[in-house]
């Protein structure tokens, strides 16, 4: 059989048998985690993360000290010491785009003045270009129905175009990071257009980014056939990008960046590893799940104002009887926040404004109704009384759908924002690191005598 005839998706009966054997011999008694005080997932029984490092890039606050005890409070998020709510409010008051300014803040640790910001924007524009024929030879040549894998492939291929790809000096890594931040909108949108054309038989559009545009404007202009967008649409997307840029060093993809960087590997490999992490439905892929869950809800609940019908659907979700049968209400709950996710609170206000302008008020009301009912249902079914709040993924899918952004690009847009945080953390690890990150795993295997093949 030739390689061209090989089906890489073919699961043979032999594979099924081996899979059962593997599963049987890989099971670990869950009681052993408590017996040996293993912090599974690097979290204790209360969900608190194990302290594995220090960072000066962002701060998450979810507790406050009351009478000597830590109690849950409304969540707060700080970028380099600045409250994200203040950052977004300041940018909104000035009626301007702010993504590029906050990239500067995350990378360099301070807010730029007018001249510094203009110079940095010009640097981003200069780097917002791909190697000659890269779109044709890499992105269009092998389209994928998974945009995250498409971006990761493009990032790894860019390694081949970099004469100093393995140089991990700070100035070179900074150059690489700024270049990747600049081209991520291109990799994301061009990857989608390749998929849409070659796999869905739609028209192919490859627009060029205008040098005067902000990152949010670039995304919308590259995506839409007529390149048109409203100022409100671009400003709301800009705000969403800011909210997704960074979230502490402990989230899965950022921690992955630290771990892979500590091995001494190159920037392209480190960012590809972070992309692989963000792709997962338990991380960045959650926004797609929220949107798909609501589409399923709309099909099964005729009256979107009927609390009883919606509650019944939510109960079916938790009972694994609806949607993907995973037992989850996507967009509800967070590994850190219990009272509220500060990003969600900011995003919700913007989504409400856009929904009113774009004619999606009924959709917004449905989301808001689920947001109110879900914590009650979860508390009742799961016996969770500490509080469950909606997270930043809850409204982001609705936002993107109102912007006519296809669901295939939801997580890539997350990555387009989060690469700023990954880059800042990669540089921080290189400046302050030195040791490879290597947590311990306790082996529970028993010693066994080796049996010769003929006697097994």
Image (cartoon, grey):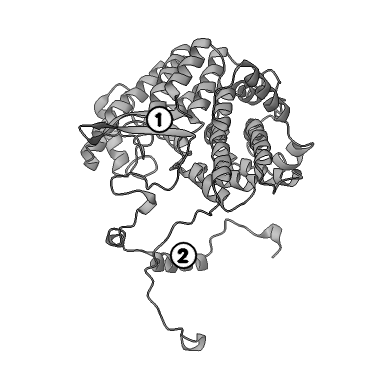
Instruction: Give the crowd class for mark 2: few <14, some 14-19, many >=20 residues within 10 Å.
Output: few
**Marks 2/1: CA distance?**
35 Å
- Disc 1, SS: helix
Left or right relative to 312: residue 232: right
Left or right relative to 434: residue 387: left
Considering depth in this image, is 392 or 114 the residue closer to the camera? 114
Check disc 2 and report the residue beneath it: 19
Considering depth in this image, is 423 or 274 the residue closer to the camera? 423
Residue that extends furthest to the bottom in the rendered view of this protein? 455
Residue that extends furthest to the right in the rendered view of this protein? 132
**Residue 450 in the image, given as x and y percentages of width and height:** 46, 83
N-term-proximal mark, 2 vs 1? 2
Q: Are marks 2 and 1 in contact (CB under 8 Å)?
A: no
Check disc 1 and report the residue beneath it: 394
- Disc 2, SS: helix
Q: Look at discs 2 and 1 and give the one toward the viewer.
A: 1
**Residue 120 in the image, given as x and y percentages of width and height:** 66, 24
Quadrant for the N terminus in the image: bottom right
Mark identifier at residue 280: none
Identify the image quadrant of residue 353. Answer: top left
């Amino acid at each position: 059989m030739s390689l061209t005839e090989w089906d890489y998706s073919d699961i043979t009966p032999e594979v099924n048998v081996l899979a059962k054997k593997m599963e049987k011999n890989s099971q670990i008694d869950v009681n052993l985690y408590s017996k040996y005080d293993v912090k599974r997932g690097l979290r204790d029984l209360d969900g608190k993360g194990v302290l594995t490092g220090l960072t000066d890039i962002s701060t998450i606050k979810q507790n406050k000290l009351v009478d000597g005890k830590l109690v849950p409070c409304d969540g707060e998020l700080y970028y380099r010491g600045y409250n994200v709510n203040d950052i977004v409010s300041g940018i909104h008051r000035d009626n301007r785009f702010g993504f590029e300014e906050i990239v500067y803040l995350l990378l360099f640790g301070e807010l730029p003045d007018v001249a510094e910001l203009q110079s940095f924007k010009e640097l981003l524009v200069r780097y917002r270009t791909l190697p000659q024929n890269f779109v044709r030879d890499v992105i269009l040549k092998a389209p994928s129905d998974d945009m995250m894998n498409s971006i990761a492939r493009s990032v790894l291929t860019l390694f081949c175009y970099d004469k100093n790809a393995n140089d991990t000096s700070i100035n070179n890594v900074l150059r690489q990071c700024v270049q990747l931040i600049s081209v991520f909108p291109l990799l994301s949108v061009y990857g989608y257009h390749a998929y849409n054309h070659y796999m869905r038989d739609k028209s192919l559009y490859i627009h060029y980014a205008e040098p005067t545009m902000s990152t949010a404007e670039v995304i919308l202009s590259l995506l839409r056939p007529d390149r048109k967008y409203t100022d409100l649409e671009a400003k709301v997307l800009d705000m969403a990008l800011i909210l997704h840029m960074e979230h502490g060093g402990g989230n899965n993809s950022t921690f992955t960046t630290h771990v892979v960087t500590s091995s001494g590997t190159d920037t392209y490999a480190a960012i590809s590893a972070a992309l692989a992490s963000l792709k997962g439905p338990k991380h960045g892929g959650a926004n797609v799940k929220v949107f798909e869950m609501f589409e399923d809800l709309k099909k099964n609940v005729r009256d979107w104002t009927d609390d009883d019908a919606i509650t019944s659907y939510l109960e079916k979700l938790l009972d694994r009887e609806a949607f993907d049968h995973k037992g989850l209400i996507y967009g509800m709950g967070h590994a850190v926040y219990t009272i509220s996710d500060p990003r969600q609170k900011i995003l919700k206000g913007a989504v409400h404004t856009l929904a009113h302008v774009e004619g999606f008020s009924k959709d917004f009301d449905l989301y808001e109704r689920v947001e109110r009912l879900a914590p009650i249902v979860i508390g009742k079914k799961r016996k969770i009384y500490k509080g469950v709040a909606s997270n930043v993924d809850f409204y982001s899918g609705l936002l993107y759908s109102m912007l006519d952004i296809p669901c295939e690009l939801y997580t890539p847009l997350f990555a387009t924002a989060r690469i700023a945080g990954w880059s800042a953390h990669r540089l921080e690890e290189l400046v302050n690191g030195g040791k490879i990150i290597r947590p311990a795993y306790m082996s529970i295997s028993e010693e066994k005598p080796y049996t010769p093949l003929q006697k097994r």
